[in-house]
Every structure is written in C-alpha cells, then in structure tokens.
Amino acid sequence: MMRVLILGGVAAGTKVAAKLKRLRFDAEVLILTKDADISYAGCGIPYYVGNVITDREKIIVNTPEKFATLTGAKVLTGREAVKLDAAGKTVTAKNLATGEEEVYPYDACVISTGASSIVPPLQGVNLKGVFTMRTPDDAEGLKNYVKASGAKTAVVAGGGFIGLEVAENLLEQGLDVTVMDMAPQVMPGFDPEFAAYGTRHLEKVGIHVSTSTKMEGITGSEKAEGVQTDKGLIPADVVVLSLGIRPNTAFLKETGLEFAKNGAILVDKSLRTNLPDVYAAGDCAVVTNRLTGEMAWAPMGSAANMEGRVLAEVLAGREKEFAGVLGTAVVKLPGLNAARTGLNEAAARAAGYDVETVVAVNDDKAHYYPGADNFITKLIVDKNTKKLLGIQVMGPGAVDKMVDIGVTAISLGATLDQLENLDLAYAPPFSTAIHPFVAAVNILLNKMNGDLESMTPAEYMENRGEGYRVLDAAQAPSIPNAKFVDVAQVHGPLEDVDKDEKLMIICTKSKRAYMLQQRLKYFGYTDTTVVEGGLWFNELPVKGK
C-alpha cells in the first residue's frame, strides 16, 4: 500500500488527495496542515469583507472531518512541517497544540504548503487595525474591526487583484479608500495604457490611487491612524497589507531541493522535484509558461487545482504532464471587470517576438438589448506567424468569456486567420452577430494588411499625435477646436484640408474614424491615422493641432 504524505491543504493539497483517492482508494493518504481550515475559497475572501458573501461557512469548502469522510484521506490539523528527510523518507512536524515533534514516514511526499502574505519590517505593522488578506480569519478580523471601530478611512497597500478587490469591498462598506503601490501602475500584468484606464475608473468611482509611492511606516500609538509614505501622510483607520506573497518553503532550505529566486520549488512537467519521490504543487511551486517555456510562478487557485489533479494522476502511475500556465486572471472592480491572459506587449517584445497589437472597442452584446455595453480589447500577436500571444479585456460585462477564447487560441497555437470566422454563440442577450472577439481579430487583420492605419493608445500617450491635425469623426461634435467631419456627408475632398496634411482621426470607438479614413484614402489623402480605442478609451485632451 502506497503512503502519500501531503504537506498543506487549501487548493493543491486537497485536490491531490481527493483525486488520488478516487483513482487509488487503497492508497494511504495523509494531509498535514497547520491551519484549522483545510480547504477554503481564498479568492472569495474579499467578498466576505464586503458582505457580498454574508456567511463565513460559505467560503469554507470542506471541514477536515467532512473532507476525510468524503474522500477517505486522513487529515491532521495543527501540524506544521519543520523538516524533510528525503533520504530517510520522513517528515517531522510540530504539533502546535502540544509543542511536540512528530515524525511521519512516506513513500511519496507532496509539498503544497502554499504561500504567506508579505509583511514589511516597518514601524507600525503590528498595530491594531493592520491586516493581511490571505485566510478566512484575516477577513473575519478585518470585517469585525471595521464594524467595531467605526473606521472611516482605509489604505490598501498593494494594487494587485486581491488589494483592488478588498478596496472595492471596503468602499461598499462606506470607507474612504486609498490604494497605494510602489510600482508605477496598479493591476500588474496589464499594459500601462490598460492600467491607466483602470486607474481612471477607480478614481471616478471614489477610490483614490497613489502609484510610485513608497510605504515608510504606519502611524499610531495603539491602533493605526495613518500610513506614512515618501509623498506624505495618508489618514487610515484601517490598513490592509496586500504587498504580495512569499512561498512557504523556508523549512526546506537545507534539504537539497532546488528553488527559484523567490523561494518557490522547481518542478518538472510532472510536478516532480529534484529529490526522489518528492513532489510540489500550488503556490509554493514554480511551473512553466506554456508559450515561452520559461519558469513561471502562478499563485492562483485555478492553477493550483489543475496542478493537483495532474499530480494525483502521476502518483497513481499514469503518464501525465502539466502543460504550464499563461498568467490568466480576472478581477472585478466597481462597475468594471478586467481580464488578461498570455504575454502583455512588453513581455512579448522582451521574449523576442515581432509584435503587432490593436486596441478595439466593440459592443459586448446586441446594442439594442437592455444592458448592452462595450468590451475594450487588446490583442497581442506575432507578426510572422499571426499567432495570438496575449489578450487584455475590460468592460462591465463578461470579460472572462473573451479571455477564455484567447486562452484556447493561445493554447492551440491558433492564427488570426483561423480565428476570424469562429462559429461562436450568438443571440442578442449574449453577444453580437459577429462575436466581439472575432470583431477584434478582424480589426487587427485590417491593421496588418494595411487597410487600417492607426496609432495605438500607448503611442497616443507618448504624444505621437504631435503635428497632426485632428479630425473629429464622432456622430456629433465631441472634440473642442477639432474639425468635425460627418463621414456620411463625405463625397469628395474635404474643404480646407490638404491631401498631404497629417490627419489624426478620432471618434467615440474608432469605427467611424476607420470609415472616414477609408473614404479619405479613396479621395487621395496620403497621411491619415486612426487613434485606436477612440474617445471611449483614451483620455482627453487630444494631443494634436
């Protein structure tokens, strides 16, 4: 009988245990975890803070007792692994209730110890009112403190997805919320122009954003009163530290395991480490990017579950490999959803691809259907192969379906030519006759074949429009001091516009601008450019004449 010892629960560990017991019920599977909660919905924690989820038990996926009964695996809580003896095939764990050390033998050891929130060594981090956001207890503590203290102001340190989700839910509780980050942008992984759009939206709904801001300490005598930064003091009755996470692997440093620079464990495609019969999965392990083949750390619940499933099949004796990750992620902001997968533009260029991009604004469903809005989509492709490398999408609707199509395309190595006629689902409540993903593909193909000559939002932000004359092609005049042109009335050369003049054409979503560009080309205009994303995405003032 095979003895499988699993260190850690939550996502990867419990998935390995559950799947393995389904495949090999005769296997002896034991999970050791230091936490009382073995399996919880970590990604749902911010919504418990905001009372979107009102019952804590809803985010506890399984109690240790329920999990053990359901799967047949044995679970011991309150056990913290402190030593791995790979030669002797044992793990030493500390019983947190008694303080005694216990030794557990194994035939196969799975390390799924996860990661912990980073707490900087700064003054005030131990004050009342300072929280991290990783476990149900963290959420419970924050929620109760806000209610009991009557907190009015909050600072969320860290503009990643968890930080932004916490910020939204604190805003819903009536707090004045500031998100600060040392980086030049929030929403890591998105290209700067998309992060800038997200920042403008956050400010619009009432969340203050301070980027390129260094945290120097937390002020207060017994409880938090403010966050001291290199730009000044930000008042804060509550401080949430969302500064990233660190793999829980410190106890393994002397074992001979190989690690990435951040402390995550290196594994092969079957989740094996360099030590015999020792495996790793989840937030404590580093896998590969399925596009580039390079190492990729993807501390996501989705990846952890998939890794756990693959590893269970490997332990059951099957030939199985984990294909790697694409960095797929989605986040809900107040009134705006944002998702991404694959390489962003900067990463694609750094990886050596010859990159082309487009930003498209398209209806997310039939424009006449109640609740219709728009998707803002950025596609990143390799010019030489026309293969999709990445996609970023924002909008109030189902951005996940757009990105999920992108995941499929990237994973299968699909080209734009293969994607332009996808037979995707259509009915007015759900989509448009030409699916918004396909519409974005068509716009990029127009750009690549020369029909569309355009300026990207990133180029627009870099003042590439200097020296151009602005033509306003919206349905009604929308740009102060610009020449308004109704494309429907253009039947010949424009008055007072020279055919060799540099013309920057802008409308609401770039569709009418593209139509005007095509017509002007027909009438002999030689230097026109359309600003991708139009007024919907780009921020005024227009940078042109």
Image (cartoon, rainbow, N blue to C red):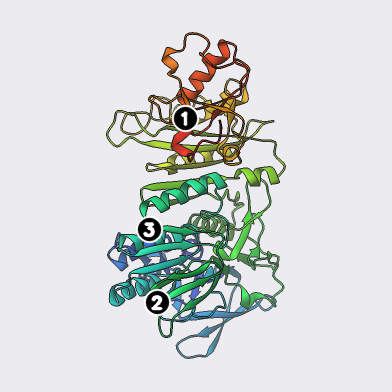
Label 1 vs 3, first from the N-terminus: 3
User: Dot 1 corresponds to which residue?
Assistant: 481
Q: Is residue 508 above or below residue 68?
A: above
The N terminus, quarter of image? bottom right
Lateral position of residue 537 relative to residue 370, left or right = right
Residue 120 horizontal/vertical position (percent): 56, 74
Residue 224 horizontal/vertical position (percent): 42, 78
Write the residue at 60% across / 58% down.
297
Front position in the image: 155 or 480: 480
Give the Cα distance between marks 2 and 3: 18 Å
Amino acid type, mark 2: Gly
Write the residue at 54% across / 60% down.
299
Of tags 1 and 3, the one toward the viewer is 1
The C terminus, quarter of image? top right
User: Dot 2 corresponds to which residue?
Assistant: 129
Give the Cα distance between marks 1 and 2: 51 Å
Is residue 18 something that shows in the picture?
A: no
Is residue 369 something that shows in the picture?
A: yes
Amino acid type, mark 3: Glu
Quadrant of the image occupied by residue 128: bottom left
Q: Residues within 10 Å of mark 3 (few under 14, many from 20)?
A: many
Q: Is residue 491 above or below residue 435?
A: above
Residue 334 horizontal/vertical position (percent): 36, 52
Label 1 vs 2, first from the N-terminus: 2
User: Dot 3 corresponds to which residue?
Assistant: 168
Q: Is residue 99 above or below residue 55?
A: below
Front position in the image: 383 or 81: 383
Front position in the image: 99 or 144: 144
| Secondary element at tag 2 | loop
| Secondary element at tag 1 | loop
Amino acid type, mark 1: Asn
Write the residue at 49% across / 55% down.
302
